[in-house]
Image (cartoon, helix red, strand yellow):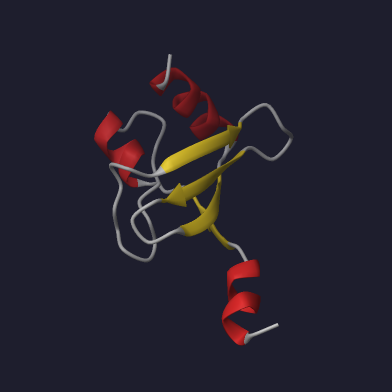
Amino acid sequence: MSGEQRLRMAMLADTARFRPDDPDELVEAAFACPICLHADRVRREAALDSYDPWCECHCPACDERWRVYLAPQQALRLSVLHH
């Protein structure tokens, strides 16, 4: 296994940085790609009902994947954003 493959297997992880009362644009920006900073095309798959809520993100621009962990209030805010 090459060094690049090993790095690809290690998923980046972050903690969401927005307040529950922030505007939608700031909530969306919290999920911007940590590599190329694209935010508008990032795809998210959320696990908001789990004990430790998180979103798995994928940036099609640079093919990076990462996970963003959320506080319970942030998970609630994110669920309201998409309904």
Residue 40: x, y in percent?
28, 42
Q: Residue furthest right?
A: 51
Question: Of 47 and 19, which appears nearest the observer?
Answer: 47
Report whether 58 appears left or right of 23.
right
Considering depth in this image, is 66 or 17 the residue closer to the camera?
66
As drawn, the residue found furthest toward the bottom would be 3
Image coordinates for residue 48, horizontal then vertical, percent: 61, 30
**On screen, 22 above or below 61?**
above
Residue at 44% x, 59% y: name it: 63
Q: Quadrant of the N terminus?
A: bottom right
Q: Quadrant of residue 83?
A: top left
Residue drawn at x 61%, y 86% as measured from the top left: 3
Q: Is residue 22 above or below residue 6?
A: above
Residue at x-position 39% and y-position 51% = 60
- Depicted 43 relative to depicted 77: above or below: below
Q: Quadrant of residue 62?
A: bottom left
Q: Residue 49: x percent and y percent? A: 67, 26
In the image, farthest residue toward the top: 83
Where is residue 74 drawn, in percent x and y?
49, 34
**Which residue lies most toward the front here?**
1
> Disc count in the image?
0
